[in-house]
Amino acid sequence: MRLITGGIAAAALVLLLTGCVAPAPAPTQTPVAEPTPVETAPAGPLMCGDLVADANLAAVMTGSDGVAPDPVRAIRPSDAFSAVELAAAGGLGCSWRVGAAPTTIYAGGDDLAYLSIDVLPGAAAQWQPAWAGDAPSDQTLAVGAIEASTAVGESGWQLTAPVGDAWVAMRLTASGLGTTGSRYDGISPEEMLSRLAGVAETTFAAVEGATAEQLAFPAAASQRQGDAVCNGGLDPQGIGMALGTTYTETEVEDPTTRAPQSFDAAVAAAARSYSCDYLNDTERGPHIAVVHGAGQFFDLLGQADVSTAFGPLDLSTVAGASGGDAAIVALVTDGPASPVLMRVGDSVYLIQSKDGAASVAEAVIAQIR
């Protein structure tokens, strides 16, 4: 056995007696990681801001001058009734304008353009390609894993596809395309479609990842239940009297009677809208379209650019008109006659006539009341 001797032993004894031993190391605490935030989907239905980023909007609508514009929310005036139809069908319609706001329904301008993105839930199984002129387009473009149909023409650039359970349609239009020149002169069709595809990536992802609740947009309070008939407010007798003539034939267009061949037809069928055309032996008279149950969406037409391209039509002197009835008439400087958009009760009407559209609108009210 080895002994501790002398000074070493004494030093050891002092340490023991005084308790001067090195303290045990303090226990260390391991930091607890914060839980990773779980992204939750928006509680309500998708909104237009969910479909496209502002930067993508500016990029797709930039003209050949290369200057990024500042798009604003607006409805193209000629799409006013279509906007009501889409809302009545339970769809989401989003549109933006660049350039000066039009002050007439047929106004143009080399800086004016509109981009629209429309979503019709539950219509993917009905999907059809975009139309190129008078025939379906055979051109396609891959947007991620989705093969989209595309078309180019004087009406603009189109891109459409079935996405999840919905039918999505996109269109970029510009004044002067193929005629006086537009803000996109000099940009190839391939480049413009590539821009649309860039927007579509975000749109498709939002729609494909949406829950059923996020695609449950408000729809018409009630829809037409029976056959499409041109009676009541649409009776040809009163329509003819308003224009000083007699119509001997009425053509009814009911989009619910066949499979849709276009996005617009699918929307009209979902909204259960229909139209009447009035004819006699010598002329083709007014065209009237109606969507029942859509009165709540008439206020959409107070938005830009409908608010600048249409003016109010005074119904205060019309016999039978109630306080809830309202009408607006398109402002024109020349060219085709002014169409009228009107709410009577819970229905919205589009009245087109080469003359006397306002008189026809009054006749519709008189026959309803």
Image: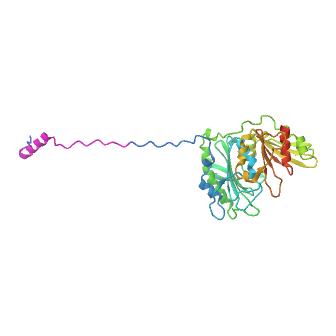
Give residue 125's position: percent from left, percent from top. Answer: 69, 41
Determine the residue positioned at 74% across, 47% down. Answer: 82
Residue 147 seen in render = yes
Picture quadrant of residue 69: bottom right
List the single residue furthest toward the left: 6
Report the span colored magenta: 5-31
* Residue that protrudes farthest toward the top in the picture: 226
Q: Nearer the viewer, residue 156 or 140?
A: 156
The picture quadrant where one finds residue 321 is top right
Instruction: Name the residue furthest front.
Output: 317
User: In the rendered image of this protein, does residue 183 appear above or below residue 140?
Assistant: below
Can residue 143 be seen from the camera position used here?
Answer: no
For the residue pair 367 and 84, the one nearer the viewer reads as 367
Left or right, 211 with respect to 101, comes to left
Residue 167 at what x, y percent from top left?
68, 45
Asked whether 19 falls inside the magenta stretch, the response is yes
Q: Quadrant of the C terminus?
A: top right
Query: Residue 88 falls in which quadrant of the image?
Result: top right
**Which percent across, then down, holds residue 174?**
71, 58
Q: How many marks?
A: 0
Q: Position of residue 50 (x, y in %)?
A: 60, 47
* Residue under the point 61% across and 49% down: 49
Residue 21 falls inside the magenta stretch: yes
Front one among 321 and 69:
321
Q: How is the image coloured?
A: rainbow
Q: Quadrant of the N terminus?
A: top left
